[in-house]
Amino acid sequence: MEKTGTKEQLLMLFENNKGVFFSGEDIAEKLDISRTAVWKSVQSLKNEGYNIEAVRNKGYCLSTDTDILSLQGISKYLSKV
């Protein structure tokens, strides 16, 4: 089974919690990665067009008005058979 990449894990966290801020430290702990890896993944997602807000002392948040379709964004609406 293929391991999900950091960027994909981060996107899943953001898609499941749109509008919720997570500190870099919280994300690093949840995904078991470094804060540098968090920052790099956030920058990569931003470069792909995702509207991720970064606010000092609040953290990162996927904007609720993001309209990019992703596997992570639609999978939460699919039922498991």
Image: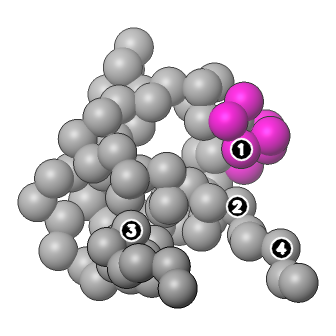
Residue carrying label 4: 3
The structure residue drawn at horizontal position 38% and vertical position 68%, both measured from the top left corner, is 76
The structure residue drawn at horizontal position 62% and vertical position 60%, both measured from the top left corner, is 9
- Numbered badge on residue 31: 1
Residue 62 position in % (x across, y down) = 30, 51
Query: Which quadrant holds the N terminus?
Result: bottom right
The furthest residue to the top: 57
Q: Nearer the viewer, mark 2 or mark 3?
A: 3
Front residue (pair 68, 81)? 81
| For marks 2 and 1 on the same chain, the one whose residue lies earlier in the sequence | 2
Mark 4 secondary-structure assignment: loop
Residue carrying label 2: 6
Q: Nearer the viewer, mark 4 or mark 2?
A: 4
How packed mark 1 is, by other alpha carbons closer than 10 Å (few <14, some 14-19, many 20 or more), is some
- Asked whether 16 falls inside the magenta stretch, the response is no
- Distance, label 4 to label 2, CA atoms, is 9 Å
- Distance, label 2 to label 1, CA atoms, is 8 Å
| For marks 2 and 3 on the same chain, the one whose residue lies earlier in the sequence | 2
Q: Are marks 2 and 1 in contact (CB under 8 Å)?
A: yes
Q: Is residue 12 visible?
A: yes
| For marks 4 and 3 on the same chain, the one whose residue lies earlier in the sequence | 4
In this picture, is 76 found above or below 20?
Answer: below
**Amino acid type of the residue that numbered disc 1 sits on in the rendered structure:** Leu
Q: In the figure, is residue 32 to the left or right of 49?
A: right
Mark 3 secondary-structure assignment: loop
How packed mark 2 is, by other alpha carbons closer than 10 Å (few <14, some 14-19, many 20 or more), is some
Q: In the figure, is residue 41 to the left or right of 13?
A: right
**Amino acid type of the residue that numbered disc 2 sits on in the rendered structure:** Thr
In this picture, is 80 found above or below 16?
Answer: below
What span is in magenta? 29-37
**Amino acid type of the residue that numbered disc 3 sits on in the rendered structure:** Lys
Q: Are marks 4 and 3 in contact (CB under 8 Å)?
A: no
